[in-house]
Image (tube, helix red, strand yellow):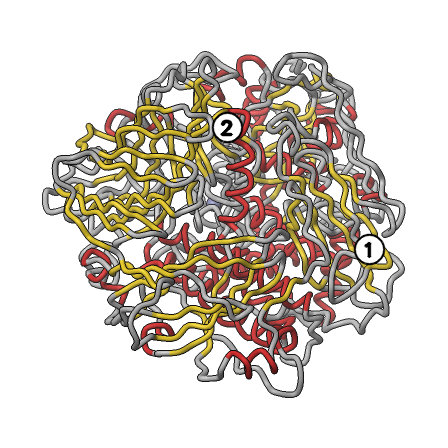
Amino acid sequence: MILFHGFVFFLSLIGCHAIPVERNAECGYGSCNPVKDDMINVHLVPHTHDDVGWLKTVDQYYYGARNIIQNAGVQYVLDSVIQELAGDPSKRFIYVEIAFFARWWREQDESMQTLVKGLVNNGQLEFILGGWCMNDEASTHYNAIIDQHSLGFEFLRQNFGECGRPRIGWQIDPFGHSREQASLFAQFGFDGLYFGRLDYQDKDTRLNQTTMEMIWHGSPDNLGSKADLFTGVLPNLYQPPDGFCFDIFCDDEPIRDDPRLHDYNVDEKVYDFLSAVQDQAKHYKTNHIIMTMGSDFQYQNAHHWYKNMDKLIKYTNMMQTTNNMKVNVLYSTPSCYTYQLNRADKTWPTKKDDFFPYAHRDHSFWSGYFSSRAALKGYERETNTFLQACKQLDALAMLTDMHNNTLNIQVLREAMGVVQHHDGVSGTEKQEVAYDYAMRLANGRTACQKVMNDAFAKLIQKGSEGFMGVAFCDLLNISACEVTQNNKQFVMVVYNPVGHTVSRWLRLPVIGEAYTVMGPDNSPVQTQIVPVTKRTMQIPERNGAIATNELVFKVSIPALGFSTYFIKMSNSKPTKEMQQSRMEKIQGKDFIMKNEHMALTLDGNTGKWKSLKDLHSGIEINVTNDMAVYYGMPGNCSRGDFQPSGAYIFRPNGTAPSGPSSAMLIKGPLVTEVHTSFSSWATLVTRMYTGEPYTEVEWTVGPIPIDDNLGKEVVVRFMTDLKTNSMFYTDANGREIITRKRDYRETWTFNQTEPVAGNYAPVNSRIYIKDDNKGLQFTVLNDRSQGGSSIQDGEVELMVHRRTLYDDCLGVGEPMNETGSDHNGLIIRGKMFVHSGTTDTAAQFHRDFALRQYMAPLPMFAVTDMKYSDYSTYFRTMWSGLKQELPPNVHLLTLEQFGGPPIGPVDTQTYLIRLEHFYEKGEDAELSQPVSVNIQDLFVPFSIVGAEELTLGANLALSDLNRLQWQAKDQYVRDKEDKIYKVEKRVPLSSALDPVMLNPMEIRTLQVTLRGGFPQRKENKFDVFS
Ligand SMILES: [Zn+2]
């Protein structure tokens, strides 16, 4: 440990020099400032934490606009820091959020860009993390996390090359940490991850046990060491030690070092600093410690910081000679620090669960934001699908840049990148900023619609007859769509972004009572008319939509392709294909809803569920459902037990399950629904479609009443008779499953202070419970990220909407009170999908369904009175982009034209492809097996002649990746049976002709060249932000 030889604070000021700096004019670990192996090395990391939207919008933060809200202007940070770095080669700075850096970069002239490139090349300015933002980890989907990082990486690759490639994850502010994020970081090629926030009990334990730094197994059961990541918890969130904030906005004392002046304080400052060093060093394993010198939007005047840090370094290091003090202070970066830890040759402790939920003190669990702003969360998830479809269609149609398509896709890429921020999709921003995020997504979708129309023009058109173009309906979930409700005849083109044939039930808002629907081959499609309910009609965001009915039918779409449906209002008598729904009040008698797969019994008085039978296994479980309200705790935050519920925090103060008042049955041959009102503002539809192995539950919540001055947080609950032994299971960012146990934490003895909020976990796509004795699994999938838990054995609940009347005192300064377009309180609608069956068949359902749900088909509409015969002469009515479907356990995670210059010696436009095995090991007897895909001749529009495997972030040839190797305490990853488990070896890809082998949960990222090639598209696509 640390060797302090007593403090003698009498410093001679004569003859002192700044520390000599040996320079190595290259980036990477070789460019780090030198350390002294026989001393405690204090790595000062100058940094700024720039939220990509929070109290102000991203652009207000960039310019320093509306400083009355928060004095923060990122442009000044970069202006100022660059000058400081240029003046002294020993100085270091890290920059993190590329959304901001890209804004600044495009404003700089060539000489400034040359200067900055020089600073990057010599390691003085280092990009850390390198995502478009520092994404939230609880409510983000892995697809969007990979995309937002790839976007930032691509900016850096195009502008800075290898020296701009980030090596370290830097999640200093997100409110809890996901294991999947660690896994993705490892696959990006990162050598380490640092963060600031973890449960206060966990932190105490780690400080005491010197386990602040560890190897995190990001995928212990699947990817093994490939997903291992060195992870460090920062000592002081991401702030400097107390008394050493030298920012222009800080009140700490500057170092006053002229003894001729009053208040000379060098001795005192150095003493305090050495105390801080000693305090910190005793909790960390090596003779290196890291100090984060910066905070939110700091360094607008970088000189304040650097002038004082220069003195701190100088006077502290002087004591090496004057006092034989073994402390060496240096300017450093997280990667230089990581490199030294790696050199230290230690064996590190390990972890294989996650860091959710986060609590900063008793009663203060940050599990509210898992569900905050449920509408924004839903819109973001749906917009991810839109972006994937847009990129796919651009690639499949092989669009050149004629209509600025590169740029138009970029608008949505960047919008999605911004919204992933930890005060974006998390829902912890101010209301005005939430509106700005939604507007960015809407603008991005509009831009992408142009691309999709260009693509359809090419893919649909057979001859010279121009395609009429399609319109999009964004409000189908509230039964509003201009084309379908205002026209008696129209066509619908449905695009399927999944590499398998997909069928799906669609519901189109219409005004007629009967319609003929003809499929792509002109054969009639069965339909059912279901009335739009009063509840839906009352949603103000419908904005006068006139639809009175929903036209329900099932579409089938080939892999990565489209199908066309011809829809016409019918004046003649309804045929056997056209079915009307019958409406009945349920009164007294239990009702059984049944299809080929299951039978659900509902209570005749309440409409609540009673039992659900899986007709395949014949097993029946008792299950009932309801909606319940948690009242938000009021409080002033002065202590843990005075913590109110707010945008971040979930702090319930009692519950009130609402009793159902009425139930209405809507019956028909295709779909049967039970509409249950738990109150005028909380309603459920239980829905069973013919042929589907799940029950759909549509919830509509709002306006949440607040006239009693109580905030309310609404959950949908399912209560089964399964024996679950406190266990439940939730997904991490839509990928691997995390096992959770109520009132328990794997790595420390947990003292629970909030029996509900402290058991909440992020649920991005699914939550389930199991009865291992009966071999049964009860799974609930959702359509957006939510918080969820199993508060009692046999139960599952998901929080769907919340309205809080208190600010929770964590900075946002507002209650989470969304009022909607009529200012009465926002109404939100969403869906859950319930599956009950045997454990050995459960994965096959939930893996496949989760994929089809997040990559749901996109319906688009065109008004035309063309007959089928004419339409099908001029246009394709059905098309697939794949020559054969992908294997059932493989997902085409990415298909896009690759933006910048290709990686490696290629001179034509390249494509980026990511293939994913989306099953975990052991989940399914067949589908969890390794699988291979032949990509050479897979796609219809093009064949592939070359492939280069890249890291997951697509910024480096995988063969060039060389991660630091670490010694972990349990070097062997153990499987569930606790046998030593050998990680499947990756089969290297030697050429495009080789099949791509995929192991469970493996994603492989390929840059491919196409036969014949085609000219490079516009390169500099980083000049939009909209
Ligand atoms: Zn932040």
Q: Residue 995 location in percent, x, y?
A: 82, 45
Residue 355 numbered tag: 2
The residue closer to the viewer here, 895 or 1022, is 895
Residue receiving disc 1:
936
How far apart are the alpha carbons under marks 2 and 1? 41 Å
**Which residue is depicted at the point 27% across and 33% down?**
601
**Circle 2 Cα neighbour tier, 10 Å, few/some/many (<14 / 14–19 / ≥20):** some
Q: Amino acid at mark 2?
A: Phe
Asked if residue 789 is positioned above or below residue 951 in the image, the reply reads above
Q: Residue 982 location in percent, x, y?
A: 76, 21
Residue 472's image quarter?
Answer: bottom left
Asked if ligand 1 lies within 8 A of label 1, the reply is no
Asked if residue 225 is positioned above or below residue 1019 in the image, the reply reads above
The residue closer to the viewer here, 615 or 1019, is 615
Asked if residue 563 is positioned above or below residue 133 in the image, the reply reads below
Residue 438's image quarter?
Answer: bottom left
Quarter holding the N terminus is: top right
Tell me: 543 left or right of 198.
left
The number of callouts visible is: 2
Q: Residue 653 location in percent, x, y?
A: 21, 29
The residue closer to the viewer here, 324 or 778, is 778
Residue 879 numbered tag: none
Q: Residue 629 location in percent, x, y?
A: 22, 36
Q: Amino acid at mark 1?
A: Gln
Say whether residue 878 is visible: yes
